[in-house]
Image: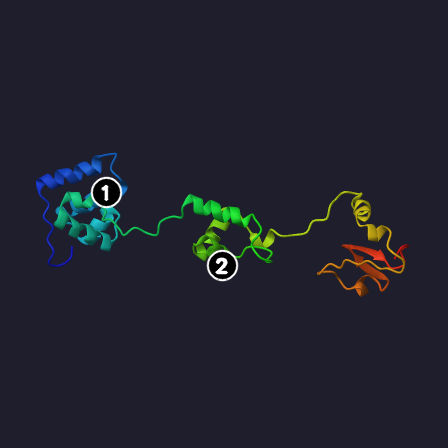
Amino acid sequence: MRAGIVVSVTPEDRLRLEGVVRDRNSSQKHAARALALIATAEGCGTNEVMRRSGLSKPAVWRWQARFMDEGVGGLLRDKTRKPGKPALAAQTVARVVELTLADPPGEVTHWTARAMAKAVGIGVISVQRIWKAHSLTPHRMKGFKLSNDPRFLEKFCDVVGLYVDPPAHAVVLSMDEKCQSASKRGSDAVLVTGSWCRADQPGL
């Protein structure tokens, strides 16, 4: 007990405190507070009150002071705290997911957290949390996949007429912006619509 502080527990208070401890429906924290005040009423020092109740020293002192001000009722009621930041509305979360799975505006290849936050009107951290919760990785969602159709090249060539039947002395090229240097594949090779063809191929 802190010096100069006296906690007076009346017989009626003692009965209520013991009732809280015995009640199986009492929460653990309420029972611990009641045990602390019962030990205090028995003249126990702070260390013994801590041992019996399982509370820390600051907690023991806090609930002794609360009891002095509000009685047993004060031990059974937690002071209300200022409400935290409200959770995002379900519609907002759904909007972020919907936009993430769609193409971003302009010529960018994928959504960034900053761009998404601006589009939806929320914070960048909120966007990142939504992506994490839904296992979304926009920077990895864009990619090129070649068809596994064994006749893909044949069908492709049929569509591109210039490739199959080019005019005389004409060379038709469609270079990929991330293509490798022709020198790495041989000096007589060029990249045509994503496929390597020899320059001496008939028709070229």
Q: Position of residue 124 (x, y in %)?
A: 46, 57
Horizontal relation, residue 203 to residue 142: left or right: right
Secondary structure of the residue carrying tag 2 is helix
| Total tally of numbered discs in the picture | 2
Q: In the image, what residue type sits under mark 2? A: Arg
**Label 1, residues with CA under 10 Å away: few <14, some 14-19, many ≥20:** some
Most distant residue in the front direction:
167
Residue for badge 1: 30
- Left or right relative to 4: residue 173: right
Amino acid at pointer 1:
His
Task: Categorize mark 2 by other alpha carbons within 10 Å: few (<14), some (14-19), many (20+).
Answer: some
Query: Taking the image as drawn, is residue 164 in sight?
Result: yes
Quadrant where the N terminus sits is: bottom left
The residue shown at (16%, 52%) is 65
Circle nearer the N terminus (2, 1): 1
Q: Position of residue 155 (x, y in %)?
A: 80, 44
Horizontal side of residue 90 vs 152, given as left or right = left
Residue 126 drawn at (x, y percent): 44, 53
Q: How far apart are the alpha carbons under marks 2 and 1?
A: 46 Å
Residue 153's label in the rendered image is none
Please tell me whether mark 1 sits on a helix, a strand or a loop: helix
Q: Is residue 132 visible?
A: no
Q: Give the label, 2 or 1, closer to the camera.
A: 2
Query: In the rendered image, which residue does mark 2 sit on?
Result: 114
| Percent x, y of residue 132 | 50, 50
Residue name at image x 75 percent, y 62 percent = 180
In the foreground, 133 or 149 = 149
